Image: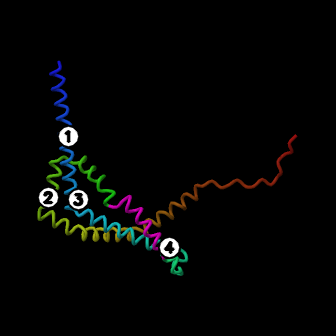
């Protein structure tokens, strides 16, 4: 009986060690994938866009165009505080561990091997090179289609508001006779 328990414990221990090794290997491959995808650079570009939006928002605040030098410094300090908070929550250093966990739990080791091999290949590298241009052009196409769609959407909203107004009950006219006296 003792021998059976000892064997069982060895099997369980070995299983746990293999599972940990497998998980570490998958995490390493997910991390390698993110290096190939230049996620740090991509997220840096995203953060630059957010920084620009924060600057535009603060510059459009009432009185920002007439700010004193002291107020301009306060605005700059505020922008930096906002970006520090944003970076702490959604900067690549904050997201990377969760993304590694996500990819390691979503893909098998063989799938990660295949994905990494693809992005290491000449075709995968060309795809990475062309993706920013494709994203820019895709955004332009979508924006063009949305601007073409806008008049139709506006008309739909107007028609809907008219239909809603037509079915809204009218308030009852005010009572002109006084209520009967209470006894």
Q: Which residue is mark 1?
A: 19
Q: Which residue is mark 2?
A: 118
- x%, y% of residue 92? 31, 60
Earlier along the polypeptide chain: callout 2 or callout 3? 3
Q: Which residues are magenta?
A: 73-91
- Between the C-alphas of marks 4 and 2, the distance is 48 Å
Q: Name the disc covering residue 68, or none.
A: none
Q: Which residue is mark 4?
A: 74
Q: Name the disc covering residue 34, or none.
A: 3
Q: Secondary structure at mark 4?
A: helix
Which of the two residues, 47 or 167, is positioned nearer the viewer here? 47
* Mark 4 or mark 3, whichever is nearer to me: 4
* Mark 2 or mark 3, whichever is nearer to me: 3
- x%, y% of residue 20? 21, 42
Q: Residues within 10 Å of mark 1 (few under 14, many from 20)?
A: few
- x%, y% of residue 86? 40, 62
């Amino acid at each position: 009986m003792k021998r059976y328990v000892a064997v069982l414990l060895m099997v369980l221990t070995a299983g746990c060690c293999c599972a940990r090794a497998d998980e570490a290997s998958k995490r390493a491959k997910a991390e390698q994938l993110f290096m190939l995808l230049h996620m740090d650079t991509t997220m840096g570009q995203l953060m630059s866009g957010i920084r620009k939006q924060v600057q535009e928002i603060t510059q459009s605040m009432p009185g920002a165009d007439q700010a004193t030098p002291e107020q301009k410094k306060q605005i700059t300090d505020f922008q930096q505080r906002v970006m520090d908070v944003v970076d702490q929550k959604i900067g690549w250093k904050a997201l990377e561990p969760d993304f590694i966990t996500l990819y390691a739990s979503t893909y098998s080791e063989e799938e990660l091997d295949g994905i990494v091999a693809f992005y290491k290949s000449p075709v995968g590298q060309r795809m990475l090179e062309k993706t920013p241009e494709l994203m820019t052009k895709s955004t332009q196409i979508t924006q063009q289609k949305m601007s073409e769609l806008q008049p139709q959407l506006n008309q739909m909203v107007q028609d809907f508001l008219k239909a809603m107004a037509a079915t809204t009950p009218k308030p009852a006219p005010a009572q002109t006779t006084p209520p009967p006296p209470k006894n």
